Image (cartoon, grey):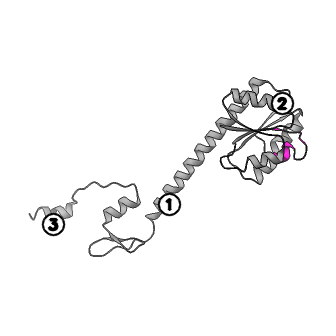
Amino acid sequence: MKVLIVEDDPVVRRILEDLLTRWQYEVVSTTNGEQAIQALQVENPPRLAVIDWQMPGMDGVELCCRARHQLKLSPLYMILLTIRGGKANIVQGLESGADDYITKPFDQEELKARVQVGARVVHLQTELAARVSDLEVALEHVKQLQGLLPICCYCKKIRDDRNYWHEVESYITTHSQAKFTHGICPECYQKVVQQI
């Protein structure tokens, strides 16, 4: 998984790069909010970000706001990294759109655990989005069998949207997951089978 680092301090950035690389993440490093926005707009962008709060220009809180509300990236898990502690700062950071918050100096094991949580959340969100997409496709297939079906009153064939006529069994098999088993109803048994 790609992890975006947004850190203007070269020493802290290098430490984060080394740790995340050691933990088997693909690292994308930036030094400010503007570079981070660009890194998030490429094809196959990072889905997890470790963001320093205090940076020149666009700070981490503004970056979280923009990433969450303007870029509409989903899923994107953002961890704010800052020297600011206290309830008010934590609330401000989380309300800006960050998913987690770590104070500096950070503990390596805590950072690793929080990054792992973020990776799990992103994985689950991605999986959920794929399932929702599958359900939407399935719903479209179900909708194909709703409404009026033009059917011949003599041979019982069904006309499709391109004006082709199909056997009922063939049409339903194509437009649904229904499978047919064959049998003989009592009325047909009397009319056809017993007459043989």
- Rendered position, 194 above or below 52: below
Report the residue that reaches farthest toward the left: 196
Q: Residue 69, how many percent across, how many down?
A: 77, 52
- Residue 62 part of the magenta segment: yes
Q: Earlier in the sequence, mark 2 or mark 1?
A: 2
Q: Which residue type does callout 1 highlight? A: Glu
Q: Viewed as shown, does residue 78 lie left or right of 152?
A: right
For the residue labelled by badge 2, is the local secondary structure a helix, a strand or a loop? helix
Q: Marks 3 and 2, how far apart in space?
A: 87 Å
* Residue for point 32% across, 62% down: 170
Q: Marks 2 and 1, how far apart in space?
A: 50 Å
Residue 96 visible in this rendered orientation of the protein: no
Q: Which of the 4 image quadrants contains residue 9?
A: top right
Residue beneath label 3, please?
191
* Residue for point 19% across, 64% down: 188
Q: Along the line of sight, which residue is nearer the eye, 69 or 45? A: 45
* Residue for point 45% across, 64% down: 144
Q: Viewed as shown, does residue 53 lie left or right of 70?
A: right
Chain part drawn in magenta = 50-63
Q: Viewed as shown, does residue 114 lie left or right of 172?
A: right
- Rendered position, 61 above or below 21: below
Q: Which residue type does callout 3 highlight? A: Lys
Residue beneath label 2, please?
12
Q: Marks 1 and 3, how far apart in space?
A: 40 Å
Q: Quadrant of the N terminus?
A: top right
Q: Which mark is residue 140?
A: 1
Q: Which mark is residue 19?
A: none
